[in-house]
Amino acid sequence: MLEKLMDIDRRIIFILVVLAVIIPTLLPINLPISVSAPTRQLHDYINALPAGSTIMLAFDYGPASLAELNPMAKALLKQCFDKDVRVIGITLAPEGTAMGSTLIQEIADETGAIDGEDYVFLGYRPGEELVILGMGSDIASVFETDYNGKPLADIPMMTNVTNYDQISLLIDLASGSSTEIWITYANVRYNLQIAAGVTGVIISQMYPYLQTGQLIGLISGIAGAAEYETLLDAPAKGILWINIESFVHLLIAGLVVIGNIAFFVQRRKEE
Amino acid sequence: MRRQVPLILCFVFGVVMMLTQFSPHSFSQGIYEEVLSWALIISPFMLVLGTVTLIQTHVARIRRRTEHWQYSFIIFAGILLMVVIGIPFGPQHPIFVWLFNNVQVPMDATMFSLLAFFIASAAYRAFRARTFEASLLLVTALIVMLGNVPIGDLFWNTVLSGLPWDNGLSDTKQWILDNPNLSARRGIILGVSLGAISQSIRILLGIERSYLGGGD
């Protein structure tokens, strides 16, 4: 029995994972969400920005990470547009262009934000560090036009924005090491305020920067997205998906505990 | 000479760019801006280089008939299709956007989603408390995993409601991230940074030449 349990067919585990995803998706479950301090810090920072401020939102991720990062991008855009904070969207990842432009357009349609006045999407340029450094001197020297090909000089919200001096905050939505690059080049050299929204696997890397104040806030994975939606009182996919993820985590924890009980019982028998 | 010229260029530009960081003088900053503009122009060629290398690699695979060589044709078909639509019509052309949203996004998302199944299976089989260190890792992982989702605190606040504090799991998770994790990460960052500085000096001085390719 124990041997069978320890050598369980992995297809059974796969079926359990499928059930742990499907059942909470179908049932209306609303688990209580407590908001962590780093998420609240970012929310409060944006809330405190005066109307007409400009922030930069970097979509530095690809489709593999959209499940975690799209909900936080939507929540951030909604908060900014509702607060009349202008948004400059960019990406250091080539795959980020299609996702970034679509997301901004989608939230702009919902909130009535106007292209060129409330937001602009600049798109992608290769050369990560060079793009960050170049924009510190002059954004137009790196992005002569926006993603639609319109010259920056013809975009109303860009008339008074030349470099990071006019940007109140950069939020990096990242699935890799881009946040560290932004901190190294934009925060250290140009003193640009930076916050991040990152996938679950890189949360732990961000904590040294939170402690030093180089990150003024952090949204951590899908849990962070759910926390942000809770703060905005705008439940969306973040809250739905954290409920589902809860059951998958519970399943994995349960499997680990069962596996260890079986392991210890078998080892005692062998002794 | 083929090696000396790149080494001299690397040394001169490296030292000059380093010196510009210490001088706010307009001449120094002018050089910095100029070199930055050059670099921004040169950087798109990295994409060309990457594409050429990818094509060379897969041509070699097809020639040598290595395992699964047939799949290399799918790479070429994918590149060709996106280039044929993307270059003349731009990345906002409906067909380009459709291909991205309906081919690349589902494929990437599927690849990443598969991890959930493999992690569940691997955790069940391999996560055993065989030693003290493994037990410590296991307990920490369980706390962080459950503390990171709302069901962890729900469990704590209902099943363990007799305890004197609420949200114990998420608080403990936060303490782990704020203290042991932060300390270890900072150590890693310091080590990596010192290594990067030392490697940069070796490259500037021409001691480290592997970036030139070939032997040596």
Image (cartoon, rainbow, N blue to C red):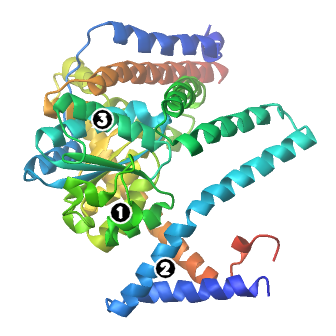
- The mark total stands at 3
Q: Please indicate, yes or no, whether residue A215 appears anywhere in the rendered image.
A: no
Q: Quadrant of residue B23?
A: bottom left
The type of residue carrying mark 3 is Gln
Quarter occupied by residue B149: top left
Callout 1, which amino acid? Ile
Q: Is residue A76 above or below residue A179?
A: above
Residue A105, numbered label: 3
User: How far from the left and from the top, in percent, is residue A184?
Assistant: 38, 67
Q: Residue at x 26, y 66 (%)?
A: A164
Percent position (x, y) of residue B184?
Answer: 42, 57
Horizontal arrangement in the rendering, residue A15 relative to residue B214 (left or right):
left
Picture coordinates of residue B13, whole percent (x, y): 55, 85
Earlier residue among tags 3 and 1 = 3
Q: Nearer the viewer, residue B105 or B109?
A: B105
Rounded to the nearest angstrom, the CA distance separating label 2 from label 1 is: 22 Å
Q: Residue at x 22, y 68 (%)?
A: A165
